[in-house]
Image (cartoon, rainbow, N blue to C red):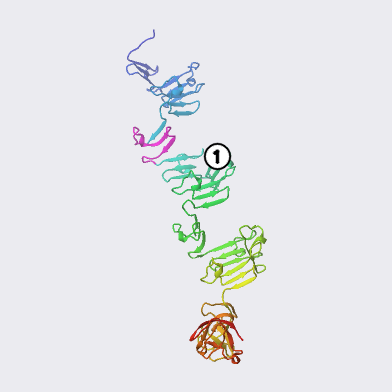
């Protein structure tokens, strides 16, 4: 039968007779060390050599306050169980520190795995006061809060972990930033596809490279895309994105789904909060490009493949906002404008239906199944209605159609008397015109064009001058001032000059009328004075 002791048993060292080991039966305590001796507990495996402290499988060292488990052929493990757990089942442990696998397992078997860390003044009884928490239930790591800013710092092997600024990667909650690189290291972020090889940077589908100031997306069988959504957008539906940068189709799409797409470019001193200060605006809503303004003139320069973009003078196409000019050609290149119908082949210049050539100085319109037409409208004309054009060049018919009525020629006006449209004029000795004032005047030149609803179709000898000039109808239809007091006028009657200034009258005396007839009345005038449409036929 083994020896039994009650109460306290003390073991002293031989040299100093000081207690170094105590077994207290009343309290159930075993004390090792003290009084100049370090306390150690060594536990050996069945095959362990008890003569060698280094051969122990478990070593509790009081001097260094450490627990060593494992080694010497044994895997070191620390397992903690729930009170209802099966300690004979290693997998039933809710906390397992496994030396062989260098792993710490927390949770499972009905318990949530958590690591909680508190500030020095935190309340460990209150989970909500943690500043660091690893939550196995939620699969989350929480850093910061409760008066502490959360930071994640990653260092190189040679960096000083006590120096926050030397961290090569820093995720900071204080300023909501992710910093990567610096200190001689370029920051790089690599994102891989599910089947990519992470050891091969070239296989990354998305690469953010700080040294090159570049973002690369796509390649390796994947099309690069960047999607930006509005507040109400559905991020699971790419079609609701308001901005889409498409690497596969090399396209940039802005707007749609409610917002209109816009591109705004500002000068270095511009205010980006004020869209009106932008120097260049591309607006999807109005389908407009606006360039210039705010003290800057807008220009577009297009260069040939061998031209220098640093020299604006070498541009072969220049659209100038300040001078409202378009310049094309020069510098060895002929300027041309080609316009094609919808079904034409734009790679074949000969299929163009409109061609303006600076090399030959020609305008070619029509052909290739389309007749060429030129329509010119007055200021108040309706450009959607070709019939309102005052001039129409019809290539199919070979006609020049003039909607207005007469062929006129400009003359200098003699004297200071006003010469209004519809006035009958005669020539003076200097070849200038003046209102008629005598009957049957052989110097009759015609009728000043522009009275009533008729306008001249062609005006000859039109020139810029300081002298007063009037367009005089030489042939065609014109409204003429007529005085019927010398005889009622019937349609078809020949008209000549009258004693009434600027008026015509019926040519009743055929002998005197020879050489003094200005035309034939197209409508009657029974009495008084009025405007009568006349077919001008000088004879």
Residue tagged 1: 193
Residue at figure coordinates x 48%, y 54% from the top left: 260
Q: Which residues are magenta?
A: 119-148
The residue nearer to you, when weighing 229 against 413, is 413
Indicate the position of residue 160 as horizontal and vertical percent values: 48, 40
Confirm whether the magenta stretch covers residue 142. Answer: yes
The residue nearer to you, when weighing 506 against 109, is 506
Indicate the position of residue 71 as horizontal and vertical percent values: 50, 23
**Relative vertical location of residue 250 with respect to residue 398 in this rendering, above or below:** above
Quadrant (top left, top right, bottom left, bottom right) of the C terminus? bottom right
Q: Residue furthest top?
A: 1
**Relative vertical location of residue 193 with respect to residue 291 in this rendering, above or below:** above
- Residue 275 in view in this figure: yes
Q: Is residue 11 left or right of residue 213?
A: left
Indicate the position of residue 196 as horizontal and vertical percent values: 57, 38
Confirm whether the magenta stretch covers residue 89. Answer: no
The residue nearer to you, when weighing 198 against 399, is 399
Quadrant (top left, top right, bottom left, bottom right) of the N terminus? top left
């Amino acid at each position: 039968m083994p020896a039994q002791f009650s109460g306290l048993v003390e073991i002293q060292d031989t040299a100093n007779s000081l207690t170094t080991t105590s077994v207290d039966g009343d309290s159930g305590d075993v004390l090792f060390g003290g009084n100049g001796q370090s306390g150690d507990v060594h536990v050996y495996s069945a095959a362990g050599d008890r003569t060698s402290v280094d051969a122990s499988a478990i070593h509790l060292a009081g001097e260094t306050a450490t627990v060593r488990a494992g080694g010497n052929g044994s895997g070191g493990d620390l397992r903690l169980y729930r009170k209802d757990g099966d300690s004979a089942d290693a997998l039933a442990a809710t906390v397992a520190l496994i030396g062989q696998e260098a792993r710490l397992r927390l949770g499972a078997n009905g318990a949530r795995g958590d690591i909680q860390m508190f500030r020095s003044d935190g309340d460990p009884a209150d989970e909500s006061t943690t500043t660091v928490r690893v939550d196995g239930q939620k699969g989350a790591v929480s850093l910061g809060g409760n008066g502490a800013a959360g930071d994640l710092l990653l260092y190189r092997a040679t960096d000083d972990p006590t120096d926050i600024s030397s961290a090569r990667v820093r995720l900071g909650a204080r300023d909501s930033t992710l910093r990567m690189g610096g200190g001689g290291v370029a920051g790089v972020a690599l994102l891989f596809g599910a089947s990519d090889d992470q050891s091969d940077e070239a296989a990354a589908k998305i690469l953010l490279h700080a040294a090159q100031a570049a973002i690369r997306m796509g390649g390796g069988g994947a099309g690069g895309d960047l999607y930006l959504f509005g507040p109400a957008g559905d991020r699971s539906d790419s079609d609701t994105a308001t901005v889409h940068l498409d690497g596969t189709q090399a396209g940039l799409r802005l707007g749609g789904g409610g917002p209109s797409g816009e591109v705004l470019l500002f000068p270095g001193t511009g205010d980006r909060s004020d869209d009106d200060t932008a120097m260049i605006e591309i607006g999807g809503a109005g389908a407009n490009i606006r360039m210039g303004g705010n003290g800057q003139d807008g220009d577009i320069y297009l260069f040939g493949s061998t031209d220098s973009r640093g020299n604006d003078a070498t541009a072969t196409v220049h659209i100038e906002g300040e001078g409202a000019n378009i310049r094309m050609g020069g510098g060895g290149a002929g300027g041309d404008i080609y316009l094609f119908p919808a079904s034409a082949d734009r790679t074949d210049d000969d299929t163009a239906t409109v061609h303006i050539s600076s090399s030959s100085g020609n305008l070619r319109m029509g052909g290739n199944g389309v007749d060429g037409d030129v329509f010119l409208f007055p200021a108040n004309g309706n450009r959607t209605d070709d019939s309102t054009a005052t001039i129409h060049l019809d290539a199919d018919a070979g006609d020049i159609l003039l909607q207005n009525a007469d062929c006129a020629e400009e003359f200098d006006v003699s004297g200071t008397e006003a010469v209004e449209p519809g006035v009958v004029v005669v020539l003076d000795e200097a070849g200038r015109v003046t209102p008629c004032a005598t009957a049957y005047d052989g110097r009759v030149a015609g009728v000043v064009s522009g009275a009533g609803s008729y306008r001249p179709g062609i005006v000859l000898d039109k020139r810029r001058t300081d002298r007063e000039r009037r367009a005089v109808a030489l042939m065609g239809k014109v409204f003429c001032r007529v005085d019927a007091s010398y005889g009622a006028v019937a349609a078809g009657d020949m008209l000549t000059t009258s004693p009434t200034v600027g008026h015509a009258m019926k040519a009743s005396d055929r002998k005197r009328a020879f050489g003094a007839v200005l035309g034939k009345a197209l409508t009657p005038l029974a009495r008084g004075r009025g405007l009568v449409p006349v077919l001008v036929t000088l004879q």
